[in-house]
C-alpha cells in the first residue's frame, strides 16, 4: 500500500508530505496505481521546481518507495495551486473503489 501523509500547520498551510510504500496492485512495470501516484507526485515536484521560485527539499528512496518533500517556507500561490492539483488526483485514486485498498491519503498537523 502507498501511504501518503500531507503535513499542514495550524493555519492549514501545506508544509510538505511523506509518501512510503508500493501499491502492490500488480507486478512492477504493470502496477497502474503506483504509476498514477508516482506521476502525480513527481510531476508536481518538477513543476514546482521549474515554474515557481519556492525553495523545496526532498529525499527519495525508490527501493523503499519513500519520498519526503518539504517546502522551505510558506508555499507561493503557484506552488499551492500545483500541490492542490496533485492532491486532487490522489484523492480521485483514493475514492476509486478499484484502487482505494492500494493507496491511503491522510493529513497531519505539525
Image: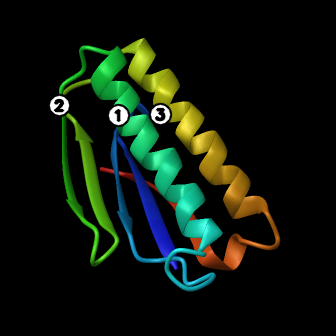
The residue indicated by pointer 3 is: 83
Whole-Å distance between the Cαs marked 1 and 3? Answer: 11 Å
**Placement of 76 over or under 62, stated as above or below:** above
Color encoding of the figure: rainbow
Say which label, 3 or 2, has the lower sequence index.
2
The residue indicated by pointer 1 is: 46
**Placement of 52 over or under 33, stated as above or below:** above
Disc 2 element? loop
User: Within 10 Å of the Cα at label 2, are there few (<14), some (14-19), or many (20+) other Cα atoms?
Assistant: few
In the image, taking residue 89 as reference, residue 96 lies left or right, namely right
Q: Quadrant of residue 37?
A: bottom right
Whole-Å distance between the Cαs marked 3 and 2? Answer: 14 Å
Residue plotted at (24% across, 20% down): 54
Contact flag, marks 1 and 3 (Cβ < 8 Å): no
Say which label, 1 or 3, has the lower sequence index.
1
Say which label, 2 or 1, has the lower sequence index.
1
User: Within 10 Å of the Cα at label 3, are there few (<14), some (14-19), or many (20+) other Cα atoms?
Assistant: many
Residue plotted at (62% across, 77% down): 102
Disc 1 element? helix
Residue plotted at (52% across, 60% down): 106
The residue indicated by pointer 2 is: 72
**Placement of 62 over or under 64, stated as above or below:** above
Q: Position of residue 41 (x, y in %)?
A: 45, 48
User: Within 10 Å of the Cα at label 1, are there few (<14), some (14-19), or many (20+) other Cα atoms?
Assistant: few
Amino acid at each position: 500500500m502507498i501511504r501518503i501523509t500531507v503535513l499542514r500547520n495550524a493555519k492549514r498551510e501545506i508544509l510538505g508530505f511523506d509518501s512510503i510504500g508500493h501499491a502492490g496492485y500488480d507486478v512492477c512495470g504493470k502496477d497502474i496505481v503506483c504509476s498514477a501516484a508516482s506521476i502525480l507526485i513527481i510531476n508536481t515536484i518538477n513543476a514546482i521546481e521549474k515554474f515557481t521560485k519556492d525553495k523545496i527539499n526532498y529525499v527519495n528512496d525508490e527501493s523503499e518507495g519513500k519520498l519526503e518533500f518539504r517546502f522551505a517556507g510558506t508555499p507561493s500561490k503557484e506552488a499551492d495551486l500545483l500541490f492542490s492539483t496533485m492532491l486532487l488526483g490522489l484523492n480521485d485514486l483514493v475514492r476509486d473503489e478499484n484502487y482505494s485498498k492500494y493507496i491511503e491519503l491522510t493529513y497531519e498537523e505539525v
